[in-house]
Each structure stands twice: as C-alpha cells, then as structure tokens.
Amino acid sequence: MYVLVAGGGKVGANVTRTLLRQGHEVTIIEQRAERFRVLEEEFDYVVQRGDATELHVLERAGIGRPPDLMLAVTGDDEDNIVICEIAQKRYFVPKVIARVNDPRNQTHFDLLGVAPTVCATSSIMALIEHEVPRHQLAHLLEFKGEGLEIIEVPVEAGSKADGRTAAELKLPDGIRLTAVTHESGLGEIVRGATRLIAGDQIMAVLEPGLEDRLCRLCVRAAHHRLRGARGAPTRRQVTPAENRDEP
C-alpha cells in the first residue's frame, strides 16, 4: 500500500515509522525546515519538503499515482481540509483520513465530506463520558458514512425503562439495543425478554438525532441531559488550533 502523509510532526512521524515497519510504501511531506532536517536524518528519501496544500508539492510527492491512502495530519485544520479536498476531488485518491486539532471545527470537515477524521480531544472526552456513568450518555463510536452511531446510556431508578423488558419499551425503528452490562459486571446480548433494571448500562446502535428518545426512557426527567464533545459550539470559520503539532 502506498500512503502519502501530510504533516511531519509527532503524529505524522509516528504513523510513518509504523507504516514503514509494516512494509508499506510511504512519503511524508513537511514544510518546516528544521523539522524536515530531523525527519530526513531518520527517513532519508521518504521525506519531501514543502507545503502540502500546493499542487506541485503534492505532485512531486507522488499524489498523481494516486496513493491508496492520504493522511492529512498537520497542526492546522484548514490545511487538513484543503489537502483532503485536493486529494479526493482532483486526484481521486480513494481514501483519506484527516486530523482534527480543534473539535469545534469538526462540522466543517463533515460539511465538506472529509471523513473519517481523528480528534484527540473528542476521543479523550468520549473516554471521560464512559468513565462517568451517572446521568451521562456516552458516544462510543460514530459511523458517519453509514449514518449510525453507538452510544451507552445508564438505566436510572424510576425511569420508564427501569423494570421493563426491551420489548416493552417499543423503541422506534432507528434504535436497536445491542448489549447490557449489569451492576455485577456481567453483560448479555439484549433480546426482547431482557429485563432492564436500575444501574444497568445499555449499549445501543441508533441513527443520529434519536439519542433524546432513548434518554427519555432511561433517564429520569429531572436528570435528563445530553452531554458530549460533539455538543461543543461550532464557528462559522475554521478555528485555528491553539497548540500546533510540535516536533
């Protein structure tokens, strides 16, 4: 597999190192002169110097082949969007992966169809949500292309779901309960006869926008609230990352 990596910071260098170790062909592009020299000492001819948002730099790196995968992992979200847009629409690169430095910019990636994306902040927030079970709906995984997501929600005492079977909940077509973990730590696949009790953690696959429907069943009205990194405010313009990827 031929992979083109834009951005030679810690993320780009680590990914390149791992891919080379696995036997893949890789070219990494880095703009900063000092960082380029560091990378060149380790990777030799694999490194190209230049601005990956410029066509001649991408062409020199071999985007015209095209690569099997384009990774845009610079410290600038706007650059990552531009790089992926060029790769997809001009050179018909079959797969791209983009780094999102500021989660407030995720909407811009989504609107332009740049997917999948990786955001360290959002990933950490998802883990925090998972480790704080009280009154929380945790977004575990999102499949943007398929229009599905996997969430986890607790069953609270006194909620509509407490003491009922999965079949009795009469969920809409866009929600499927898949597994439940009891307070004892034991889990089971959810079936129609599975009875839910307070303290259970339910894992569900659902269509985006139906989280509120499930929460109304599992969480008491006084505690009903949705939280998550995805709810962070968005900006009309791409927000610069406060901390750029440093060598």
Image (tube, helix red, strand yellow):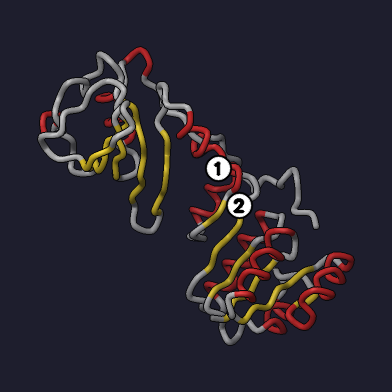
Instruction: Please tell me which of labels 1 and 2 falls first in the chain.
Output: 2
Q: Are marks 1 and 2 in contact (CB under 8 Å)?
A: yes
Drawn side of residue 151 relative to residue 162, left or right: right
| Whole-percent x, y for residue 202 in the image | 30, 34
Quarter location, residue 170: top left
Give the crowd class for mark 2: few <14, some 14-19, many >=20 residues within 10 Å.
many
42 vs 235, left or right, is right
**Image quadrant where residue 219 sits:** top left
Residue 94 percent location from the top left of the image:
48, 75
Q: What element carries label 2?
A: loop
Residue beneath label 1, please? 122
Q: Which of 234 and 41 is in front in this view?
A: 41
* Residue at figure coordinates x 84%, y 75% from the top left: 41
The residue type indicated by label 1 comes to Ser
Q: Specify the quadrant that holds the C terminus.
A: bottom right
Q: Which residue sits at x=47%, y=27%?
A: 132
Measured from the top left, where is residue 120 in percent x and y? 60, 47
Quadrant position of residue 168: top left
Q: In this view, does 68 lie to the left or right of 240?
A: left
- Percent from the top left, x then y, of residue 233? 56, 35
Q: Can residue 175 be seen in this view?
A: no
Residue 167, compared with residue 11, is above or below; it is above
Query: Which amino acid lies under the numbered mark 2 shown in the image of this protein?
Result: Val
What residue sits right under mark 2 in the picture? 100
**Rendered residue at 84%/65% (across/down):** 35
User: Tag 1: Cα neighbours inside 10 Å, few (<14), some, or many (≥20)?
Assistant: many
Q: Is mark 1 on a helix, strand or loop?
A: helix
Q: How far apart are marks 1 and 2 (CA)?
A: 9 Å
